[in-house]
Amino acid sequence: MAATGTSASELTHKPAANRSVQRVHRNRGAWRILPLSATVLSAFLGTRSFAERVQLDIAVSSEVTATNNSLLSAEVPESDVIVSVKPRFLLLAEGARLRLTGAGSFNMLGYVNKTQKSGVLPDFEINATGIAIERVLNIEAGARVSQVFDNPFGLRADPGTTTENKITTTQYRLSPVVDMQSGNGLRFTARSDNILLDDDSENASTSGPTATGYFGHHNVVFEQTPRPLGWRAELDRTDTRYENAQSALVSDVARLGLNRAFDGTLSLGFHLGAERNNFVTGDNTSEVYGIDLNWKPTERTNLDMFVEHRYFGTGGRIVFDHRMPWLAWNALISRGIVTTPQTLFSLGPTDDVAGLLNQIYTTRFPDPIERSRQVQEIIARAGLPSSLTQTMTVYSQRISLESVASFRVAYIGTRNSLALSASWTRLEDAPDTGALATGLAINNNTQRFVALTGSRRLTPQVTASLSLGWNTIKSLLTASSDQATTERSLEARVGVNLAPRTTGYFGARYREFVQDNSATPSTNNNETAAFVGIDHRF
């Protein structure tokens, strides 16, 4: 395999004495979620309130791929035959006091010529919300297993085609939520998200200090709904504790704000406050001020804007959502201080295309369980993927200033369908953090990607689709080394409905991986592959 990734001078290997201790902790791995989920499910299913409405969709696909360059290596390309079996599930259950949702898959990959290590790549999420005290206290719990890249400058192929450069992460979440409202518009909310992050990085080829640990986000708000005037008082804390790190990274922000409602569709306000960050060198307190805006002209359109001055400059989050009977899109702009556990916690759902389609059919199918069934039928019939590429998570022990701009859209027509996802991300060491500002290329870079899938129904039984992908990552000029990699892909497939719930498909793909590393010569690797498979929904 061609040399990819961070130069040796940037890597800090785990001490041998610590590795065995960490392995004892991490070998529980992603599979620890299975008995945990079974226990939770059995407890919930035993309650009368839970078993009122349940939808569980199970499907499995199997694929055989012949490739001329399994590892996208320019030195000695190796052909192989890849056999995959991928069971997946979608769960939605509602009761009087409990709601349970889940989605995900287990991708089992085998390599006939052993060019890569065979294995299982789980990727799923389960969330539960229970009403502990009516109109006062809810308890939320969740678990997520996902794949991240060991080296962001290494091979970034779809997890469905390679086990290389992957780390399996597992998150466990517990979130008590207090929400009390009065008839005159007063509202008190308190939410505490507590996340534990685990991984299997002892199996990674190159690993620095572990990114596992704890992340907490605690938020308390007391507010008056604008009628037309309103106010808001807020206390917010984020707390990250990396495993084996010397101290926690804590940020506290207090805000006081006033807002005004206009004609029932627009709310505009401003806020003042202060923040304290224990990871900032020198004076770790500073002022905070900004504006808040919410615009909802119709039930189909929503704009939320929260922009403020922070110690690092301008920060905040702007989200715009819009849906039509045949189209839905989402746009996001954000800038703020993040850590690795926080980034993984904030990732979108694994079935983001299904989420967009769910918006399209909100009015047509008000019942969430029936709407979920319809969405799965549309995805299968239109030949769309259930998810698209998302921003790549840099998995390292860090505290970063992250700027993101992203756009997602899904279109469903009578014969033509489209799903598009695009994103730009800039990651850099958080300013004024002293020794925490490492200057490493893995923590100081820009990422860009575009993923597009279009399909057309040729006949009632045959659908053709074409997918394009492009993603690149390049180190900042301020980074300690100059690195850049770009990956391009093109895939064409034809699907044939063999039965009401069974689809056969075949196709071909081409991938190109270009690496430009100051420590090694530039490389340009490519792969051509053909595949055939079958998918069945039970």
Image (spheres, grey):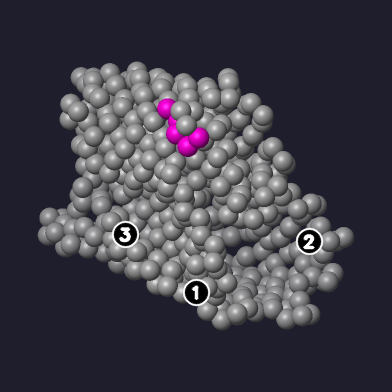
Nearer the viewer's eye, disc 1 or disc 2? 1
Expressed as whole percent of the image width and height from the top left, the position of residue 335 reads 56, 51
Instruction: Give the residue number, with chain letter if any, for mark 1.
Output: 48
Q: Residues within 10 Å of mark 2 (few under 14, many from 20)?
A: many
Q: Which residues are magenta?
A: 500-504
Q: Earlier in the sequence, mark 1 or mark 3?
A: 3
Residue type, numbered disc 1:
Arg
Expressed as whole percent of the image width and height from the top left, the position of residue 479 reads 39, 41
CA gap, disc 1 to disc 2? 41 Å
CA gap, disc 1 to disc 3? 23 Å
Instruction: Give the residue number, with chain letter if any, for mark 2.
Output: 267
Was residue 190 drawn as part of the magenta stretch in this picture? Answer: no
Element type at mark 2: strand
Q: Is residue 98 above or below residue 407?
A: below
Element type at mark 3: helix
Expressed as whole percent of the image width and height from the top left, the position of residue 313 reads 59, 54
Q: Residues within 10 Å of mark 3 (few under 14, many from 20)?
A: few
Secondary structure that dominates the magenta span: strand
Residue type, numbered disc 2:
Ser
Instruction: Give the residue number, with chain letter if any, for mark 3.
Output: 34
| Residue at x-position 41% and y-position 34% | 535
Q: Is residue 76 visible?
A: yes
In the image, 6: left or right of 177? left
Q: Residues within 10 Å of mark 1 (few under 14, many from 20)?
A: few
| Residue at x-position 43% and y-position 69% | 45
Residue type, numbered disc 3:
Leu
Residue 458 placement: quadrant: top right
Q: Earlier in the sequence, mark 3 or mark 2?
A: 3
Q: Quadrant of the C terminus?
A: top left
**Callout 1 touching callout 2 (CB < 8 Å):** no
